[in-house]
Amino acid sequence: MSALDLGIDLGTANIIITAGGGLVLNEPSVIAYDKRAQRVVAFGHEAYKMIGRSPERLAVIRPLKDGVISNNDMAQELIRLCILKVIGKRLINPRIVMCVPSGITEVERRAVVESAVMAGARTVYLIEEPVAALLGAGADITKPVGQMVVDIGGGTTDIAVTSLGGVVASASVKKAGNVLNAAIIRYFAENYKLLIGDRTAEETKIKYANVFWPSNELVGTITGRSLINGMPARVQMSENDINRAIMDDIDQIVSSIQIVFEQTPPELIGDILENGVLLTGGGALLKGLDLYITREFGVQCNIAQDPLGCVARGTYKAFRVADKLRNGFERISVFKH
């Protein structure tokens, strides 16, 4: 490894960059474009503050959706600006490891690589998110031992069982943080005739979601616009409100975990029973989710230390074990500069 090696977790919600083994950048995956001046005016935290508050001439864009690039030009610009923020004005072309959901297509993989190359990468490697998550959590995935990870990000939930440096069984489902936010927005619109924004939904989810043991006591107030008269309005809510909003999607994640269990060889199931399931990503912070998974499968579910940073740290650590990784890691030499 060299000082020019960067690990990039290009997530639907956040872009996180690691260098030298530590996190050097963590910004929302948002970019603001001035349509009149035809230029980018903000990205990351500054652009995130503009969501729902921008004038007509400003387009506030999330260039990734469900874990893959939906706006190629804006994704390239976001990656370029973030890399420049890390390396400054030095004329260097870093080697980059970027993570991708385990279920994306070859076309989507190449779009990710192209974005990194156009942003100035010298060589680009891809690593699947669950593999990176295990590496970032400190697991040694090169041993002949089955390890299971559930990585719940902003756009996708990736589940995988690894052994001997490769993915043995996996699933990727587009049920994750953004879908839970949308479910909360829909719930309050249908049940309270209250329209709330995406940021409000996310903040409410983080603060009040309780997957395992929700309370019916009123715990907070949520504000928005009345769908009856269009006026500002607020309602009091309980943890049970949030639970009712998100549990259908949580159960679909649980169903995907079951599918991966069914695909896993019996010998590796024994290892998972002994070691437990590792929970990473922003979704790991949902109160009670680890207990809910433990109850559903009878297997201990453990939350990784700093679950939000696991994938990003794993992308950088992948440089050290690249020769030992199998089908979770690949070099795209055709794009090498």
Image (spheres, rainbow, N blue to C red):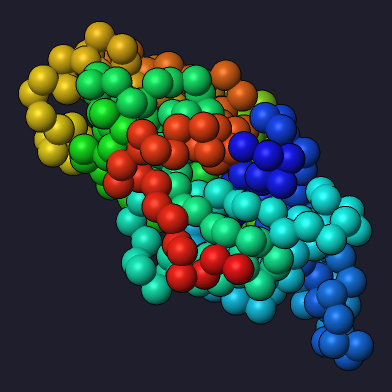
Q: List x then y, in percent, for residue 22.
A: 71, 30
Q: Residue furthest bottom?
A: 36
Which image quadrant for residue 328? top left
Quarter of the image with the C terminus in it: bottom right
Q: Residue furthest top?
A: 274
Residue in view at x 88 percent, y 90 percent: 36
Pick whichever, 256 or 328, lies toward us: 328
Pick whichever, 69 or 142, lies toward us: 142
Q: List x then y, in percent, for residue 145.
A: 24, 19
Residue 107's place in the image compared with 22, above or below, is: below
Viewed as shown, does residue 39 lie left or right of 128?
right
Q: List x then y, in percent, for residue 180.
A: 50, 48
Viewed as shown, does residue 236 lie left or right of 305?
right
Q: List x then y, in percent, for residue 136.
A: 53, 29
Q: How many marks?
A: 0
Residue 56's place in the image compared with 235, above or below, is: below
